[in-house]
């Protein structure tokens, strides 16, 4: 281990229990021996030199290439030591600070996400094999932060709770039109169409996701209620009662925030509501991780709220609610990492060992950033008018409770159908009739006014 790298690590790691063995076979210990031990092995001088010059990019790249191994502990443990010592700052050397300042200065040039470039960026990540994502996501393929309303929730339960939480904030009514910007594999759009009888248009730039979402809509018999298209949000001309965007805003780029919200303002009806769900940072604006930008999300950027709110104000939209989800994404990523590790051999069969090492570093480092740095998730509710929504937030909880009842009824109906698929079709229909529409109507009505008036609306549908 060269002297310069030894000084850098020694200056950074004051707490924790880190051992680094260099390519010459010599080991050095850093920290105060607290916490779980982590042992990093640097195998080549090339990797050692690269890490010395640009540690935040070169370390994950060397790990991907197999030039670095973690022989004690794991990636999450290593990133914990780094982030807890680093805080929200940067490594304290002249050249690494210069690199960080350069990346911050040029971040806008890295986010010139034109329509064509946005499509290329999406293809780099979201057009990977669908089989890869099925190895670690929940059964609905929700590739965004789950909502752990209860700590003991499974990933599937927390993703259902996330959809219900967002839907409650949208205050949907039966038959309303919904635009889903960045519709992914269709899970949220299908949920809104199925649960609220909404008319949903989902737009995406991923051909892989579009194909899966369209197939799912057809399989569920919902193609008359939900439709998925490959379209850029800037090309839309229709107007909608509700707009939702989950996990897409991170790909817009700070240069295009004004364009994004101007388009939302035009596409949202006068009495409409939008809910925006995005990763953000609790601290001031910063640059995207060099590793994430180069290998995982080209063109991606995690905004500070101070960068988002001015664009909303200039678009003439009103912020009606803001909620910060702090450790929910850390828990989501923990579940994803565990599932990926359990299916690692299958992932390797789809791609290769280098890809697997890149992916496990991405998941672990992301979890660490939510646990020990300043990343979080924000949900911003928007409208044109100040009288569109109730004066208090009580309607959100009421709707979530009704949706939980609906979900329970849906599961009971499904279990009943599986237990008696052919012997008692009349009983199956009766159970479904009891459990789903009544709860569906109740969910759509919760917090939206008098129950009787809502039932009349639902009956007309």
Image: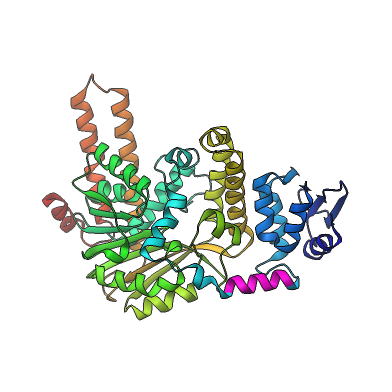
Q: Quadrant of the N terminus?
A: bottom right
Query: Residue 9: x, y in percent?
Result: 79, 61
Q: Is residue 40 left or right of residue 307?
A: right
The residue furthest top is 423
Query: Residue 223: x, y in percent?
Result: 21, 44
Q: Is residue 291 visible?
A: yes
Q: How many marks?
A: 0
Q: Is residue 390 visible?
A: no
Of residues 301 and 412, the one nearer the viewer is 301
Query: Residue 77: x, y in percent?
Result: 70, 50
Quadrant in the picture for residue 417:
top left
At x 27%, y 59%, the residue is 179
At x 50%, y 41%, the residue is 136
- Magenta-highlighted stretch: main secondary structure? helix
The residue furthest right is 26
Q: Compared to 124, does 100 lie above or below?
A: below
Query: Residue 174: x, y in percent?
Result: 20, 54
Q: Compared to 251, does 138 lie above or below?
A: above
At x 57%, y 75%, the residue is 105
Q: Is residue 179 left or right of residue 375?
A: left
Of residues 127 and 412, the one nearer the viewer is 127
The residue furthest left is 460
- What colouring does the structure picture have? rainbow
Q: Compared to 248, does 36 lie above or below?
A: above
Q: Does the magenta-highlighted stretch encompass residue 96? A: yes
Give the magenta-colored segment's residue range: 95-104
Q: Is residue 296 left or right of residue 140?
A: right
Q: Is residue 64 left or right of residue 266?
A: right
């Amino acid at each position: 281990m060269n002297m310069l790298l030894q000084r850098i690590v020694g200056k950074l790691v004051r707490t924790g229990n880190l051992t680094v063995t260099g390519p010459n076979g010599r080991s050095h210990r850093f920290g105060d021996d607290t916490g779980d031990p982590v042992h990093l092995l640097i195998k080549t001088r090339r990797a050692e030199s690269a890490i010395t010059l640009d540690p935040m990019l070169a370390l994950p790249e060397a790990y991907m290439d197999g030039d670095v191994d973690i022989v004690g502990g794991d990636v999450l443990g290593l990133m914990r030591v780094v982030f807890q010592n680093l805080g929200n700052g940067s490594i304290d050397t002249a050249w690494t600070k210069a690199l960080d300042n350069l990346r911050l200065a040029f971040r806008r040039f890295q986010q010139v996400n034109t329509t064509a470039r946005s499509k290329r960026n999406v293809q780099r990540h979201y057009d990977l094999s669908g089989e890869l994502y099925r190895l670690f996501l929940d059964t609905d393929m929700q590739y965004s932060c789950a909502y752990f309303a209860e700590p003991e929730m499974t990933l599937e339960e927390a993703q259902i709770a996330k959809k219900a939480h967002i839907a409650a904030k949208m205050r949907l009514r039966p038959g309303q039109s919904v635009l889903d910007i960045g519709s992914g594999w269709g899970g949220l759009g299908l949920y809104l169409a199925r649960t609220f009888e909404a008319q949903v248009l989902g737009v995406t730039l991923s051909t892989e996701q579009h194909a899966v979402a369209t197939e799912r809509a057809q399989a569920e018999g919902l193609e008359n209620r939900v439709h998925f298209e490959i379209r850029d949000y800037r090309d839309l001309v229709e107007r909608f009662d509700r707009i939702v965007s989950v996990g897409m805003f991170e790909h817009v780029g700070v240069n295009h925030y004004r364009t994004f919200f101007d388009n939302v303002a035009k596409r949202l009806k006068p009495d409409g509501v939008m809910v925006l769900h995005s990763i953000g940072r609790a601290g001031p604006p910063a640059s995207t991780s060099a590793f994430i930008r180069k290998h995982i999300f080209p063109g991606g950027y995690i905004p500070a709220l101070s960068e988002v709110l001015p664009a909303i104000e200039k678009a003439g939209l009103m912020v009606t609610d803001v909620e910060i989800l702090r450790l929910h994404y850390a828990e989501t990523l923990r579940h994803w990492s565990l599932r990926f590790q359990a299916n690692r051999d299958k992932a390797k069969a789809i791609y290769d060992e280098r890809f697997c090492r890149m992916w496990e570093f991405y998941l672990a480092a992301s979890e660490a950033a939510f646990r020990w740095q300043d990343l979080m998730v924000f949900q911003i509710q928007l409208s044109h008018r100040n009288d569109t929504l109730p004066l208090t937030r009580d309607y959100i909880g009421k709707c979530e409770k009704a949706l939980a009842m609906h979900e329970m009824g849906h599961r009971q109906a499904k279990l009943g159908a599986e237990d008696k698929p052919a012997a008692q079709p009349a009983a199956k229909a009766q159970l479904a009739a009891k459990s789903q529409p009544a709860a569906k109507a109740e969910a759509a009505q919760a917090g939206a006014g008098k129950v009787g008036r809502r039932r009349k609306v639902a009956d007309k549908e």
